[in-house]
Amino acid sequence: MTITKTTLTGVLALGLIIFGNSLLAKEAPELLDRVVAVVNQDVVTLREYEQEVASIRAKIAAQGQGSPPEELIRKQALKRVILIKLQMNEAHKLGVDVDDATLSLAIDSIAKRNQMTLDDMREMLDREGVSFEIYREDLRQQITLTRLHQKEVVGRIRISEAQVDNYLANSTNTPGGKTAVHIRHILLATSEGASSQEIDARKNHAQQLKEQLASGGDFPAAAINQSNGRQALDGGDLGWLEIGQAPNIFIEALVTMERGDVAGPIQSSSGFHIIKLEDYRGGERSIVDQTHVRHILIRTNELTSDNDARNRLEQLHTRITGGDDFEALARSHSDDKTSAIKGGDLGWASPGDLVPKFVEVMEGLDVNELSEPFRTPFGWHIVQVLERRAQDVTNEARREKAREALRKQRKDEALELYLRKLLDQAYIEEHLDE
C-alpha cells in the first residue's frame, strides 16, 4: 500500500528516551584529559570514561538500588565505552549515520511525546545540568547504534511463514496461561573455551546465588553486582515481554512460575541464567475498527505545483459528485499506481496503517461520503469511505506476535555474538593504571 505510516527509528518507537528519569551524565568537571584505552585506530579518553562512570552511577541511583563496588562500576564503564567505540567505528565503515535533519526530527518527536516545546526541553535539560548539545550527540549515537544493529543483526534475521506455523503449532503462546511476562535476569557468563572445571565452578556459584535469591535475596542488587548480562545495571530488568519474546530456554520454567518465583540456573552457550518472574498477564482477543476506503492521489513535483494538484482534484471531485464513476477516474488519474489499478481501493485499513492526516479525514466521513481535497506528505487526495467494521484480528495478531517473538529470541543471542565478535577482532590496550 502506498499510503503507509512512516515511523522513526526503533530507538524512538520503543520510547528509550524518558524525560522523567534522565540518565545522561551531567557535564563533567574539568579533567586533565588523557588516553585510558586504545581501541583499534581510536582512543578512549579519560573524559569519556569518567562521563560513562557518572552515567552509570546516576542510573543506579535513579533505580534506588544500593551502589555496587566502585571497581565494578569502573570496569563496566570502560567495557561500555570500548563497545560503543567499536560499534560507532563499524557504523562509520558501513556508512550508517544520522544526519542533522533526522536528528532534529527525532528531537521534535520526543518533545511532542512528552508534551513539551523545544524551548521546554532545553530548559528541562538545563535544570538537569545537561547541555543540549551533549543530549543531541547522545541521541545521535543511540539512533546510530540502533540502525547498525538493524543492519547487521536484526536485518539478517529471516522468519518464514513455515517457522511461524511451527512456532504456533509447538506453543500455544500461553504457557501456564501467561501471554506476557515481566522478568528480571542474571547471567553468570562462561568464557569461550572454558574448561569443564571452570564451567562446574560457575554452575555451583549460580546454584548458590539462585538459592539465596529464592530465599528472599535482593535480585536487582545481585544483578547489578554480579550479572554479566546487558541489563545488569538495570537490576536485570528485561521489562514486559510477550511470552514468546522470552528466550526459549526460559519458557519451560515460566510455565509453572508464579509471581516472585526465582528459577535457575539455566545453562546456555553464554553461561548460566537465573530469572525472576515479577508479574504476568493473560491474553485478550484483538478487536480493531477497520475502514474500507478508496482514494485518488495527485502527487506534487517539479511539473505539478501544489495549486495544480489541488485544482485537478477539485475538478475530479466535481465530476464524481456529478455522477462520474470513481473507479474509472482513479484508474486514469491517480498517481498511486498500486491502488489505481483497483479503482483507488486501499482495502480494509486498521489503526496505524495510514498517515495521521489521511486517518483524520477518513474518520470524519460517513459511509459513501466523499471528502474535499486534502494534503498529506504524499500529495493531494480525495477519499471515499465504502464500509466500516469491527474486525477480530486475533489470529493475525498472534502470527505477528509469533514473528516478533522469533526475531526477539534470535536477536538477543545474535547481538551478543556480534558484540563478542567485535571485541575478539579488536586491538585493545587499557591504560587506566598509568
Image (cartoon, helix red, strand yellow):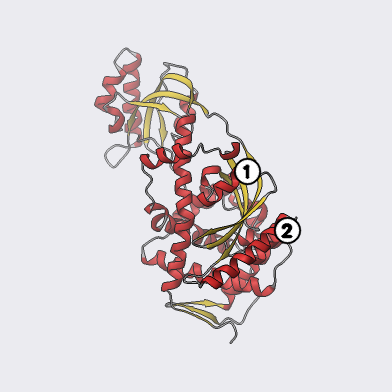
Question: Residue 120 at what x, y percent from top left?
Answer: 64, 51
Q: With 220 as the anchor, is 372 left or right in this view?
A: left
Label 2 or label 1, whichever comes before in sequence order: 2
Mark 2: which secondary structure?
A: loop
Q: Residue at x 63, y 63 (%)?
A: 206
- Residue 303 visible? The answer is yes
Q: What whole-number distance in Å separates the C-alpha atoms at marks 2 and 1? A: 22 Å
Q: Toward the viewer: 372 or 57?
A: 57
Type of amino acid at the residue the image marks with label 2: Asp
**Where 30 sits versus 341, above or below?**
below
For the N terminus, give its image quadrant. top left
Q: Toward the viewer: 177 or 76?
A: 177
Q: With 166 as the anchor, is 47 left or right in this view?
A: right
Q: Residue at x 39, y 58 (%)?
A: 152
The label on residue 432 is none
**Where 131 sits versus 366, above or below?**
below
- Residue 59 visible? The answer is no
Q: Residue at x 31, y 12 (%)?
A: 323
Question: Residue 87 at what x, y percent from top left?
Answer: 45, 66
Q: Toward the viewer: 143 or 307?
A: 143
The label on residue 256 is 1
- Residue that lies at the very extreme toward the bottom in this rendered image: 434
The label on residue 218 is 2
Mark 1: which secondary structure?
A: helix
Crowding near the residue tagged with mark 1, few <14, some 14–19, many ≥20 C-alpha atoms within 10 Å: few
Type of amino acid at the residue the image marks with label 1: Thr
Q: Residue at x 69, y 45 (%)?
A: 259
